[in-house]
Image: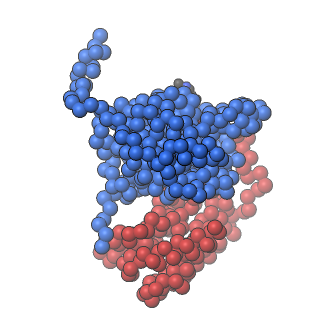
Chain colours: A blue, B red
Amino acid sequence: MSAAPAYVAKDYKSDVKPVWCPGCGDFSVLAAFGKAFAELGLAPERVAVISGIGCSSRIPAYTRTYGFHGVHGRALALATGLKLARPELTVVAAGGDGDGFSIGGNHFLHACRRNVDLTYVVMDNRVYGMTKGQPSPTTEPDWDSALSPGGTGLRPFNPLVIALASGANFVARAFSGDPNACAAMIVAAIRHPGFSFVEILSPCVTFRPDQRGWKEQVRQAPVAATGDPARAARRLMTDDGFNLGVLYQGDRLPYRPPPGEGARPADLEAEFAA
Amino acid sequence: MSADDAMRAAARKLAAAIRDAEDFRACVFAIESEAAERYAELADLMATHNNREVAALFRRLAEIEGLHARKMLAPDGSAPRLLPAGIDFVGAETVSHEAMHYLMTPRQALALALEGECKAVALFEALAEGAADPAIRRLAAEMAVEERGHVALVQAWMTKFPEPEADWDHDPDPPRLD
Ligand SMILES: Cc1ncc(C[n+]2csc(CCOP(=O)(O)OP(=O)(O)O)c2C)c(N)n1
Ligand code: SF4
């Protein structure tokens, strides 16, 4: 008989009721977090979910682990600091495409480059959901809306290409319509050493009702993950944004701070003493 | 893949992993518990959006699924053994978040529940035909009968609620800005 799992997905769900719109893809991502943590047998007090601001960034409130709902765009700065100070924790940063690629874009580049052992999950809905539907860096140039009449005409940011070029050690895409596959992807990302980036296509049914059609567009990538960045780059540059799977899995050593005693909280506080 | 094909594929996977009646109970317990939890979540969600009628309906469905899960408990009340290795699929009867709308009517909520129950019938029928062990086939056939009963129940409920009006999703103060 197989050993009893230490935890089930429900153990990671908090008592706070999500205020997301019915049908929002983020519900499935939340379910996938629970399934992934249970699959990994992670004690809730050994996990920290860190976010910025946005609908998707509310996820730490709904997760019964340590969590920090931080400042807009600063999830990765917080998560990096936490992981370096408390390397024994499993640190997962999460948020939206606006949070991660607009205001947080600079942190994204450098988190990939630093390759600290973190997992970053971006619930990409190609819009600012929380502030009522402004285009984000991943919005299609011709997405016509009241706030961007005729579309922005701007070339979208390609997060997977940028992640790869900036040094992320694991690059993958999943779709919230398949929570079990999302959970499996999060498990693989957490297990992979270094900075793991998972883009989860997560429809905003309110401001992008067209994204309900994503379930017909997504497909499993026809090729297995590669560890060759040049090959991954070629693949990602021709990707239409709907190929799912692990697209790059590198073997760069994660950044770890040099051994030795870190600063004590009292020393840090002393610096701020008035 | 159609919903029926997906159920048949899931049934094949279950049939291969289930070793005995205890495993079968474990799977049914997981399927029914997950369905109950999801209905409870959807009830909370609808309550948050002040759609009280549908919230109450989902709450009732959560209770019914919870009862089914509890039927799988041993006489001393203990939960069945854990899912057999290799089974991650338990969403057989679970209603998806994607199908929700904050203004949905009770009739639409029941149509969703009906889909969930029909998926469960398809799963247990496929197991009743395809499982190698005759004891599992018999248990699956019993479950299929029970699930068909739920289909009839939900269908009967549906007749009590009118079809949604053509403009059921009209919101005089909509969230969209265009
Ligand atoms: C410093 C700062 N600037 C702007 C805002 C306003 N703001 C809140 S959420 C958000 C964007 C949210 O979009 P995204 O990260 O894609 O998340 P979603 O709501 O779509 O999940 C913005 C611009 C803010 N809260 N703080
Ligand atoms: S506005 Fe969009 S992203 Fe925000 S909760 Fe609603 S559906 Fe989800």
- The image quadrant that residue A96 belongs to is top right
On screen, residue A7 above or below B118: above
From the top left corner, tell me how far across and down residue B70 is, in percent.
41, 71
On screen, residue B117 above or below A216: below
Hey, which residue is sitting farthest left in the picture? A261
Hey, which residue is sitting farthest bottom in the picture? B134
Q: Residue at x 38, y 81 (%)?
A: B20
From the top left corner, tell me how far across and down residue A121 is, in percent.
48, 43
Image quadrant holding the C terminus of chain B, namely: top right
Hey, which residue is sitting farthest top in the picture? A274
- The image quadrant that residue A153 belongs to is top right
Q: With A129 as the anchor, is A260 left or right in this view?
A: left
Q: Residue at x 50, y 51 (%)?
A: A226
Residue A126 visible here: yes
Q: Quadrant of ligand 1?
A: top right
On screen, residue A179 above or below A201: below
Q: Residue at x 59, y 45 (%)?
A: A234
On screen, residue A137 above or below B136: above
Q: Nearer the viewer, residue A140 or B44?
A: A140
Q: With A146 as the anchor, is A74 left or right in this view?
A: left
From the top left corner, tell me how far across and down residue A224 is, in percent.
52, 56
From the top left corner, tell me how far across and down residue B14 is, in percent.
47, 74
Q: Nearer the viewer, residue B57 or A99?
A: A99
Q: Residue at x 55, y 73 (%)?
A: B9
Image quadrant holding the N terminus of chain B, namely: bottom right
